[in-house]
Image (cartoon, rainbow, N blue to C red):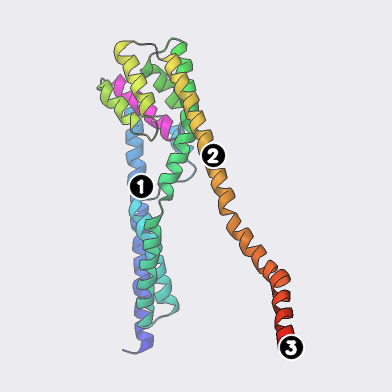
Amino acid sequence: MTGKDIHSLWVAVSALAAAGSLAFAAAGRRRDRKARGRIAALLGVAAAHERRRARPAIPAWLRRWGPPLCVVIASCALIGGAVGPAVGIAAAYAVRRRLRTRMPDDRRLREEVARQLPLAADLLAACITAGAGPGQAAEAVGQSLGGPVGDQLARTAAELRLGGEPAGAWGRFGGIPGASGLARCLERAGSTGAPAAEPVSRLAEGFRAERARAATARAQRVQVLITGPVGLCFLPAFLAVGVAPVLIGLASGLLHG
């Protein structure tokens, strides 16, 4: 086979792989949508929360293997021959390693949870002060708040309404990063009838203080990191204006002397 035939073969294989990936992605999205609909119907989560999502969920396998596959396809189409697949595989390996070193989804989830927890705790405290039980408060706040905290509150309330074990239901809510104390407080209030409005309000204040400390730490870290680019900008100018003339003058004096 000639080089042109090999190039055409690789282009056809790449096109078929891309089409198969798109088909699998579409099928996965349909399955996820149906599963979310069944869960929402079972647990009583409002469908408006699903429509309010900023962007549809991408399957995990597509997030992992989509960029490397695109790199291989592009390399085979642009370079061709026997070199294209080799270069594509090497580049795909580098992209895969880069993607594994960062976890943007987890970071976005933690940021969203940290943003929602103070408001959720305040709303829960207000509902409990008004006379609602922990399960009723969780249901009202979950249906109105949305997001990771609101959805988990709505699921917890649905489990309690269906007769689930309170410790297990609130324990799953406590699995959200930073929500373990709030889950224990609500579970204790639901089991023993202990007053929970004041402890939940204190937890809300603690969540706000923790978020303020995290924001201050990020700002201080940015102040430290910005000295690098500033130094790279000013150091060459200092060398060119302050040090270089002195060295040139000394060298000229030594040479002429």
Q: Please give left or right for residue 181 compared with residue 223 in the image.
A: left
Q: Which residue is mark 3?
A: 257
Q: Which residue is mark 1?
A: 30
Quadrant that contains the N terminus:
bottom left
* Magenta span of residues: 147-162
Q: Position of residue 50 (x, y in %)?
A: 44, 37
> Is 150 one of the magenta-colored residues?
yes
| Mark earlier in primary sequence (1, 3) | 1
**What kind of element bears circle 2?**
helix
| Mark earlier in primary sequence (3, 2) | 2
Which residue is pictured at 29% across the width and 26% down the height? Answer: 169
Can the viewer see residue 154 in this picture?
no
* Spatial CA span between label 3 and label 2: 61 Å
Q: Please give left or right for residue 241 compared with residue 217 in the image.
A: right
Q: Position of residue 48 (x, y in %)?
A: 46, 33
- Location of residue 78 with respect to 130 vertically, above or below: below
Q: Which residue is mark 2?
A: 215
Which residue is pictured at 31% across the width and 19% down the height? Answer: 161
Q: Please give left or right for residue 236 compared with residue 52 in the image.
A: right
Q: Amino acid at mark 1?
A: Arg
Q: Amino acid at mark 2?
A: Ala
**What kind of element bears circle 3?**
loop
- Location of residue 182 with respect to 36 vertically, above or below: above
Q: For the residues labelled 2 and 1, say whether their Cβ atoms are less than 8 Å apart.
A: no
Question: Magenta: predominant secondary structure element?
Answer: helix
**What kind of element bears circle 1?**
helix
Q: For the residues labelled 3 and 2, say whether their Cβ atoms are less than 8 Å apart.
A: no
Of marks 1 and 3, the one in the foreground: 3
| Mark earlier in primary sequence (2, 1) | 1
* Spatial CA span between label 2 and label 1: 39 Å
